């Protein structure tokens, strides 16, 4: 296919008042983070605080790939160790019955190439994925609207429910639409889900969104399987642990390349890219062996030591769009506060042996 959009720095276009809005978001998230820390006596991630499993595996790039897919990390066949953190989206560790997006964060180790951030000396590449192809608040202005509501919910004595009730008295159609999408997240088995980057990244000479889909029979059989979270507050953790004590798993890592900005925008991650116009294409396999997925030592390492960010990236996979630009600020701020407050230095792993059994 010859009509894939070529990457250029000019593809990104800052929104009006983006710097001011980004500052407002960062300040709000800092206040919420401090409030959560005060309540629990422990600093947590601003998003995806609750983990369900910390896994080790291998990224296998079979090859050679076609030229349009042989880009960046995927330009040559190879095998790389990976750490995977399964999680739920809220910035607090509530029960699994709380409606939430599920996360699949990948940290690839031993990656060569110039890093995006000048102070990033690690040899890692992160891909942060959730089980939705789009994000309801897909640009910085929408993000600020949602973050303002989340801060009001944090301060409301009745929490999210109280803030939502007040919203009904002074309706905001756009915010209500975003909340409806978030609150209708499903409770299917996390290992059977397909996960998406939602926002775009540079893909070498091109632009793409990244996704992960179940490939082996054992995890494909779990797709769409409902989970009783009402009576099992840690249902996802229990299911992940039980599964990996008995089985290994494989997932396909895929790229969906951008063909045109009119229908596949970079600056609005709320827009789902049409898979008929540009299908998902497999670029690698993620192979996860049987293991103890959530030992106390592994949980502590994954939740306290590790930091995941789309900006832990080589230039060939630079994050793109306003949602990614705001993440650069707020992820760094959240990580610095969490590690400093908890007295746990942040460090990027150099070898998979650093992940405890």
Image (cartoon, grey):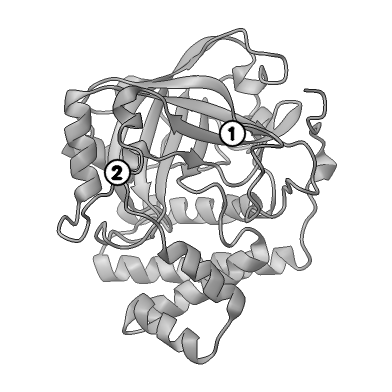
Position of 257 relative to 57 (above/below): below
Quadrant of the rendering where the N terminus is positioned: top right
In the picture, residue 24 is in which quadrant?
Answer: bottom right
Position of 199 relative to 141 (above/below): above
Q: Position of residue 340 (x, y in %)?
A: 38, 53
| Image disc number at residue 225 | 2
Residues 195 and 201: in front is: 195
How crowded is the residue under tag 2: few (<14 C-alpha within 10 Å), some, or many (20+)? few
| Mark 2 and mark 1: Cα distance apart in space | 34 Å
Q: Position of residue 237 (x, y in %)?
A: 22, 44
2 vs 1, front mark: 2
Q: Earlier in the sequence, mark 2 or mark 1?
A: 2
Q: Position of residue 267 (x, y in %)?
A: 72, 53
Quadrant of the rendering where the C terminus is positioned: top left
Residues 254 and 36: in front is: 254
Position of 16 relative to 53 (above/below): below
Q: Secondary structure at mark 1?
A: loop
Residue furthest to the right in view is 10
Write the residue at 46% across / 56% down. Answer: 334
Disc 1 target residue: 313
Write the residue at 56% across / 74% down. Answer: 175
Q: Is residue 244 visible?
A: yes
Q: Position of residue 295 (x, y in %)?
A: 18, 35
Q: Secondary structure at mark 2?
A: loop
How crowded is the residue under tag 1: few (<14 C-alpha within 10 Å), some, or many (20+)? many
Residues 278 and 156: in front is: 278
Write the residue at 20% across / 52% down. Answer: 234
Residue furthest to the bottom in view is 169
In the picture, residue 268 is in which quadrant?
Answer: bottom right
Q: Is residue 305 visible?
A: no
């Amino acid at each position: 296919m010859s009509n894939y959009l070529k990457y250029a720095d000019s593809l990104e276009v800052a929104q009006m008042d983006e710097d001011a809005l980004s500052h407002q978001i960062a300040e709000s998230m800092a206040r919420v983070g401090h409030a959560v820390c005060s309540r629990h006596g422990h600093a947590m991630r601003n998003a995806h605080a609750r983990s369900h499993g910390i896994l080790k595996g291998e990224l296998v790039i079979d090859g050679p790939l076609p030229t349009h897919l042989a880009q960046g990390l995927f330009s040559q066949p190879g095998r790389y160790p990976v750490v995977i953190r399964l999680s739920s989206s809220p910035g607090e560790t509530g029960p699994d019955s709380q409606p939430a997006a599920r996360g699949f964060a990948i940290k690839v180790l031993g990656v060569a190439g110039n890093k995006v951030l000048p102070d990033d000396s690690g040899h890692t590449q992160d891909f942060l994925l959730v089980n939705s192809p789009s994000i309801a608040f897909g640009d910085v202005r929408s993000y600020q609207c949602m973050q303002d509501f989340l801060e009001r919910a944090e301060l409301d004595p009745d929490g999210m429910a109280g803030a939502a009730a007040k919203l009904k008295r002074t309706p905001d159609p756009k915010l209500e639409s975003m909340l409806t999408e978030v609150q209708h997240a499903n409770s299917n088995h996390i290992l059977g889900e397909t996960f998406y980057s939602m926002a775009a990244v540079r893909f070498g000479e091109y632009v793409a969104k990244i996704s992960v889909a179940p490939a082996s029979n054992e995890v494909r059989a779990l797709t769409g399987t409902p989970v009783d979270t009402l009576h099992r507050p840690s249902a996802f953790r229990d299911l992940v642990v039980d599964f990996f004590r008995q089985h290994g798993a494989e997932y396909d890592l895929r790229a969906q390349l951008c063909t045109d900005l009119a229908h596949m925008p970079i600056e609005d991650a709320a827009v789902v890219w049409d898979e008929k116009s540009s299908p998902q294409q497999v670029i690698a396999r993620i192979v996860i062996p049987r293991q103890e997925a959530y030992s106390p030592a592994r949980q502590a390492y994954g939740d306290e030591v590790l930091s995941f960010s789309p900006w832990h990236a080589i230039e060939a996979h630079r994050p793109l769009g306003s949602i990614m630009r705001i993440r650069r600020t707020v992820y760094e701020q959240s990580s610095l506060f969490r590690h400093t407050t908890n007295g746990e230095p942040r460090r990027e792993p150099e070898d998979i042996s650093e992940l405890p059994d």
